[in-house]
């Protein structure tokens, strides 16, 4: 409504408890009524308006932030997630060592034991698992072949063996080739293709050492017989040739006809008895001949003056050498054969080229020199 001077005057809607009239809203709805507004709506609307206005003024007054600063929280999220995953993941187990197998030989004596000790030492040093595989009972002559088959089925990647025969080695190579495994021979080298590396001895040189030892024992004078056992054995011919070559350098030494007693202990014992009566010295090329000659010398006692030179380092031979019954033994290091064989397997499995042939040294030892430290390590590899 208008006042007397023509200006608008507020409309009073009601009288308060204090008797003061309060102005109503200027807005009037249809029919002359004002829209009803609750106290909550008025308060809420005011708060929202003040907050919105303050926020807009605050944003307007701030300086713009660099983009990289705004992106940092987003970059931190994947980094924290990755760190959490890495911390919660368990470490993966170390890979299993690769497997190599040492196939047992026909004669499980001191030399075979020394080979095994050497191979196990190398396997431990180079980080391999070495299984010693005994020959199984099967068809005659197939022991090493069956053992090799079991090793390959177990996952062996390299086979080490001192072959019992050329035929068995050929079959082992065939099995290994089919399985993608390598073959390393120890102590002997047969002319079989497919062998990755061969650790062997120079049998001719070993024969020369035996001949030189006999010549020294006889003082360059006397009658000498060469006694063999299995003339078909690998290295037999080369060993005999070496003995004869060295003895031929001494004009006062007479070389008796060669004898071969086969693999029979009775046959070798009979040959030894005959030679003891006819010669001053016996060079026995193989273990059976050495033992038969030594036993015949023991049987004769102090009356026997025949000198005995042999090959091998089996326990019984070493005992007879220590007692002075055998005068000289030409020996090789079985420990070195096993160690170097495993070393070649390691080179091969790491993708390097192994040596095709490794020749071990041999040495003639006497009852006195067998106790020298170097020879102790040669004969007894477990001695520190």
Image: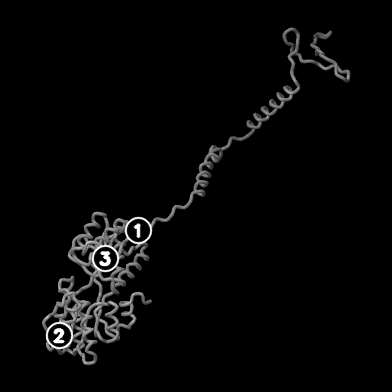
Q: Quadrant of the N terminus?
A: top right
Cβ–Cβ under 8 Å for marks 2 and 3: no
Q: CA distance from mark 1 to mark 2?
A: 54 Å
Question: Mark 2 falls on what kind of element?
Answer: helix
Q: Quarter of the image holding residue 34?
A: top right
Number of marks in picture: 3
Residue at image x 77%, y 15%?
Answer: 25
Kindly identify which residue carries mark 2. Answer: 274
Q: On the picture, is 51 further left or further right than 194?
A: right
Q: Residues within 10 Å of mark 2 (few under 14, many from 20)?
A: few
The mark nearer the N terminus, 2 or 3, is: 3
Question: Where is residue 272 drawn, in percent x and y?
Answer: 17, 83
Residue 306's place in the image compared with 83, above or below, is: below
**x, y percent for residue 384:** 38, 76
Q: Which element carries disc 3, helix, strand or loop?
A: strand
Residue at the disc numbered 3: 161
Mark 1 neighbour density, 10 Å: few (under 14) some (14–19) many (20 or more): some
SS at badge 1: loop
**Percent from the top left, x then y, of residue 348?**
29, 60
Identify the image quadrant of residue 373.
bottom left
- The foreground one among 375 and 134 is 134
Q: Is residue 11 above or below residue 383?
A: above
- The disc, 3 or 1, on the residue closer to the chain's N-terminal end is 1
Which callout, 3 or 1, points to the residue nearer the camera?
A: 3
Q: Nearer the viewer, residue 222 or 146?
A: 146
Residue 335 visible in image:
no
Task: Name the residue beneath numbered marker 1.
Answer: 98
Q: Are marks 3 and 1 in contact (CB under 8 Å)?
A: no
Camera-near label (1 vs 2) is: 2
């Amino acid at each position: 409504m208008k006042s007397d001077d023509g200006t608008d005057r507020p409309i009073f809607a009601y009288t308060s408890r204090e008797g003061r009239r309060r102005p109503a809203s200027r807005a009037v709805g249809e029919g002359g009524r004002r829209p009803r507004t609750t106290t909550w709506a008025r308060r809420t609307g005011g708060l929202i308006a003040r907050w919105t206005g303050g926020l807009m003024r605050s944003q307007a007054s701030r300086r713009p932030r660099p983009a990289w600063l705004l992106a940092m929280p987003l970059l931190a999220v994947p980094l924290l997630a990755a760190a959490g995953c890495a911390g919660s993941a368990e470490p993966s187990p170390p890979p299993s060592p690769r497997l190599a197998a040492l196939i047992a030989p026909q004669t499980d004596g001191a030399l075979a034991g020394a080979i095994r000790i050497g191979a196990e030492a190398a396997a431990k040093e180079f980080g391999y698992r070495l299984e010693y595989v005994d020959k199984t009972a099967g068809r005659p002559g197939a022991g090493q072949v069956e053992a090799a088959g079991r090793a390959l089925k177990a996952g062996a990647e390299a086979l080490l063996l001192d072959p019992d025969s050329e035929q068995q080695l050929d079959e082992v190579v065939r099995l290994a080739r089919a399985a993608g495994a390598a073959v390393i021979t120890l102590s002997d080298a047969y002319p079989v293709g497919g062998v990755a590396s061969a650790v062997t001895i120079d049998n001719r040189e070993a024969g020369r050492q035996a001949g030189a030892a006999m010549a020294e024992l006889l003082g360059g004078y006397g009658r000498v017989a060469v006694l063999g056992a299995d003339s078909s054995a690998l290295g037999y011919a080369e060993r005999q040739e070496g003995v004869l070559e060295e003895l031929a350098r001494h004009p006062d030494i007479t070389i008796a006809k060669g004898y071969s007693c086969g693999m029979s202990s009775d046959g070798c014992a009979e040959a030894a008895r005959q030679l003891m009566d006819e010669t001053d010295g016996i060079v026995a090329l193989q273990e059976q001949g050495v033992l038969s000659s030594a036993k015949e010398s023991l049987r004769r006692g102090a009356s026997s003056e025949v000198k005995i030179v042999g090959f091998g380092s089996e326990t019984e031979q070493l005992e007879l050498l220590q007692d002075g019954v055998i005068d000289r033994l030409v020996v090789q290091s079985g420990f070195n054969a096993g160690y170097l064989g495993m070393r070649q397997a390691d080179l091969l499995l790491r993708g390097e080229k192994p040596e095709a042939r490794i020749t071990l040294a041999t040495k003639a030892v006497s009852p006195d020199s067998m106790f020298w430290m170097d020879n102790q390590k040669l004969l007894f590899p477990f001695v520190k």
